[in-house]
Amino acid sequence: MNNDDARFEDGAERPLRLQALDADDLAVVSALCQDAVLPGHQMQFDRKQRRFALLLNRFRWEEHARATRQGGFERVQAVLTVSDVLSAATDGITPGDRDTVLSLLSVGFTAGDDGTGRVLLTFAGNGAVALDVECLDVTLTDVTRPYLAPAGKAPSHKEP
């Protein structure tokens, strides 16, 4: 009897590269991006390419259980890209601000007519970026090796 099923031990730590083309996919990307931090100037809307991108310092939630047991919470730099963007608007944040550090709470999608819709990036402190899109096409790509989280602990949303 030959058992060709993959085993957990066969896996290797590799950078994430995920694409969200529907709301279920986007929920996974949103969960992985929760509590990512970035300076205000690390987001850009390229109107000609119809692409909005953010360079995030993403907390590695996928390694949270291991890090809790062994210590050493990690972050990784990642690019979150929204394609087919028709327009972008901000509320409560100033794009290009080098002095502000933003914390991404969620990435959501509200469907419109004929596959169009709005991607909403919600930040701590009531900041948001709304992206009107022709269709849902979001990618999350890790671009560096993981590094120890400077705070040394997992993000928390509990009141002090």
Image: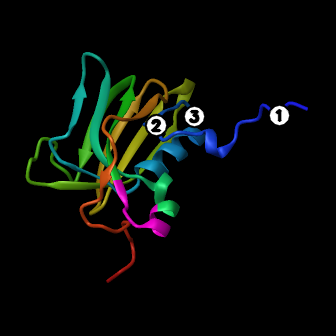
Q: Residue at position x 29%, y 60% from top?
A: 126
Please state which amino acid type lies under the numbered disc 3.
Asp
Say which residue label 2 marks: 14
Work out whether residue 99 or residue 147 is closer to the camera in this orientation and state it: 147
Please state which amino acid type lies under the numbered disc 2.
Arg
User: How many other residues sit within 10 Å of disc 1, few (<14), some (14-19) or many (≥20)?
Assistant: few
Query: What is the number of the mark on residue 114?
Result: none
Q: Position of residue 83 (x, y in %)?
A: 39, 25
The residue tagged with tag 1: helix, strand or loop?
loop
Q: Could you tell me which quadrant the C terminus lies in?
A: bottom left
Q: Residue at position x 86%, y 30% from top?
A: 2
Q: CA distance from mark 3 to mark 2?
A: 24 Å
Please give the range of residues in magenta. 67-74
Q: Are marks 1 and 2 in contact (CB under 8 Å)?
A: no
Say which residue label 1 marks: 3
Say which residue label 3 marks: 22
Q: Position of residue 25 (x, y in %)?
A: 56, 39
In the image as oriented, which residue stretches furthest toward the bottom?
Answer: 160
Q: Position of residue 80 (x, y in %)?
A: 36, 37
Q: Based on the picture, tell me whether residue 51 belongs to the magenta stretch.
A: no
Work out whether residue 45 or residue 32 is closer to the camera in this orientation and state it: 32
Q: Position of residue 59 (x, y in %)?
A: 37, 54
**Considering only vertical position in the picture, is 9 above or below 49?**
below
